[in-house]
Image (cartoon, rainbow, N blue to C red):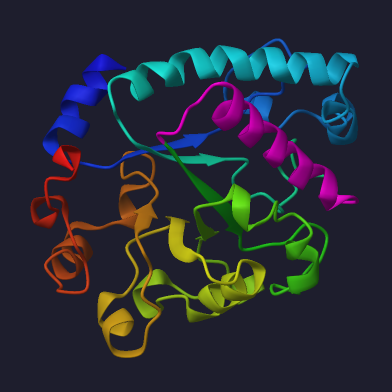
Amino acid sequence: MDAQKEWWHERGGLVSFEWHWANPMGTGGDFKHTQPKKEERPDVDRMVTPGIPEHIAAMEDLKRHADYLEQLRDTRVPVLWRPLHEIEGGWFWWTDVETPENTAKLWRLMFDYLVKDRKLHNLIWVYSSTLKAGNKDKDVEAISYRQRFYPGSNYVDITGIDIYVNKWFGWPDYRESAYSKAYEIMTKVAPGKMLALCECQGLPNSDLMAKEGPRWLYCLPWYVGNKPEWNPPDWVKQVYPHEQLITLDELPTLKKL
């Protein structure tokens, strides 16, 4: 963690954590444990019910993670904290597809523990939706359903959405879109909040953003090492210098504020 701090925070960058929370009832901590088999998925309702094994396991796991996050708080490193991401998608264990209110309770439980109990006031809470809402098939809006996952404006600082090219759901190539439909969805789910393109296949079309909008707070293209073709060099060279985008070299020295 110290090496990461030296490499990015000290350069003036904004530290961002996307927390793939492994199933607290499981025995492993890697990515596959965020998507356990159906018979191994924890009951989110039980996880937010005090005094029973699922809740105890969740709180013990939160404590372990809070111990690490304290290191960043104590060295005054702010963190864009994005837990329970793609919250209403249904492929991660924390999505209660049938009773979304349980997932919202899980977010509030986490917030209350990390902020109120552990005093991790360096966390900037980022709520992240996704292109597909649970079992709603091609209904990409599903506003009332999406709203049931939302924990409330007092528990969220920034909201946003993860968008990947998917013609079946009607999402076009990122070089042809700035995802105005996704932006509109999130204004209805979380009115009044700053909106980010929390995760995307590639850098969106900055010309379209400048001419037509939307004006995303930031975008996080999925890392190049996994799919280099998603951010080809010629596209990056075209998009990065655009006045619509603020890059690291243009940021003020935020760590001195």
Does 204 sit left or right of 156 as displayed? left
Measured along the vertical axis of the image, is residue 135 above or below residue 80? below
Does 249 sit left or right of 227 as displayed? left
Give the overall secondary structure of the magenta segment.
helix
Measured along the vertical axis of the image, is residue 4 above or below residue 110? above
State which quadrant residue 205 falls in: bottom left
Residue 91 location (% of width, % of height):
72, 44
Can you say which quadrant of the picture contains the C terminus? top left
Residue 18 location (% of width, % of height):
48, 38
Residue 30 location (% of width, % of height):
57, 20
Measured along the vertical axis of the image, is residue 184 above or below residue 52? below
User: Which segment did they paint magenta?
Assistant: 97-122
Residue 132 location (% of width, % of height):
68, 62
Does 79 sit left or right of 142 as displayed? left
In magenta segment, residue 118: yes
In magenta segment, residue 178: no
Measured along the vertical axis of the image, is residue 146 above or below residue 94? below
Can you say which quadrant of the picture contains the N terminus? top left
Q: Residue furthest left?
A: 249
- Of residues 142 and 49, which is closer to you in this image? 49
